[in-house]
């Protein structure tokens, strides 16, 4: 039985092996070169069962990673907070305007979200240059922090909307920036423009 050393990958092949005259390691056609005696004791060709084992392990590994990635992706999607928003495109100075947000999520079939916890609605402080705050429903605790005001809820039902009542202070393009936060969810943000007009003859005083 002759042993042939592959000049490409260094694997020792047996001339009786099923892949001969091609290398069992890299597949190139082997030159008629015998293996030096110093290599005979430690280099061996890979038999068919070993190849099958390696391929099987590779497939199993890919399957495992595929499942893991799918699960992680599903978990990431399930943690995304979204909201259905009603923002008027047009409003009038001095007239109460309603802005509604209904929190929702990209749900997992196995773990549907029924209640959101530690909910915070952030209204950018710059919004209060264009709007006066009138009321919010359901009632909330308001906190000032950094460049925003936060309306805080310990919990909020999945189908319970938040309604902001705002009164436009001046005519023009008013910017409305809102962000919604909840425990274990990535925040949701929206920026909208409201066209505010002034009714004829209306005199407005800027108050907050």
Image (cartoon, grey):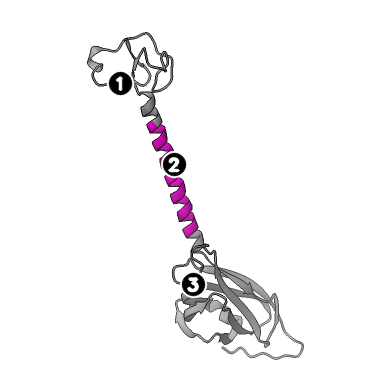
Residue at 61% across / 81% down in the picture?
A: 130
Q: Are marks 3 and 1 in contact (CB under 8 Å)?
A: no
Residue at image x 68%, y 87%? 95
Q: CA distance from mark 3 to mark 1?
A: 61 Å
Q: Secondary structure at mark 3?
A: strand
Which labelled disc corresponds to residue 181? 3
* Residue 89 pos. (x, y %): 70, 75
**Residue 31 x, y percent position in the rendering:** 39, 10
Q: Are marks 2 and 3 in contact (CB under 8 Å)?
A: no
* Front label number (2 vs 3): 2
Residue named by callout 2? 62
Discs 3/1, front: 1
Badge 2 density bin: few <14, some 14–19, many ≥20, Cα 10 Å: few
In the image, 58 versus 205, the foreground residue is 58
Q: Dot 1 corresponds to which residue?
A: 44
Residue name at image x 38 percent, y 32 percent: 54
Residue at the far right in the pictured view: 200
Q: Disc 2 and disc 3: Cα gap in Å? A: 36 Å
Residue 198 included in the magenta stretch of the image = no
**Residue 93 image point, x, y percent:** 68, 85
Secondary structure of the residue carrying tag 2 is helix
State which quarter of the image contains the N terminus.
top left
Magenta-highlighted residues: 53-75
The secondary structure type at the circle numbered 1 is loop
Q: Quadrant of residue 46?
A: top left
Between disc 3 and disc 1, whose residue precedes? Answer: 1
């Amino acid at each position: 039985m002759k042993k042939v050393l592959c000049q490409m990958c260094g694997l020792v092949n047996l001339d009786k092996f099923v892949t001969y005259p091609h290398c069992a390691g890299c597949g190139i056609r082997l030159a008629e070169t015998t293996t030096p005696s110093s290599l005979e004791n430690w280099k061996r060709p890979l038999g068919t069962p070993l190849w099958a084992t390696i391929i099987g392990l590779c497939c199993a590994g890919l399957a495992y990673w595929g499942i893991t990635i799918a699960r992680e992706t599903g978990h990431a999607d399930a943690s995304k907070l979204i909201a259905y928003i009603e923002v008027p495109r047009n409003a009038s100075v001095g007239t109460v305007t309603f802005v509604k947000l209904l929190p929702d999520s990209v749900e997992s079939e196995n773990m549907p979200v029924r209640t959101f916890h530690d909910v915070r609605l952030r209204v950018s402080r710059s919004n209060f240059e264009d709007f006066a705050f009138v009321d919010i429903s359901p009632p909330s605790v308001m906190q000032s922090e950094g460049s925003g005001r936060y309306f805080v809820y310990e919990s909020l039902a999945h189908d319970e909307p938040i309604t902001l009542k705002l009164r436009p202070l001046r005519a023009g393009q008013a910017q409305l920036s809102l962000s919604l936060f909840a425990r274990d969810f990535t925040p949701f943000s929206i920026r909208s423009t409201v066209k505010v007009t002034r009714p004829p003859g209306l005199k407005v005083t800027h108050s907050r």
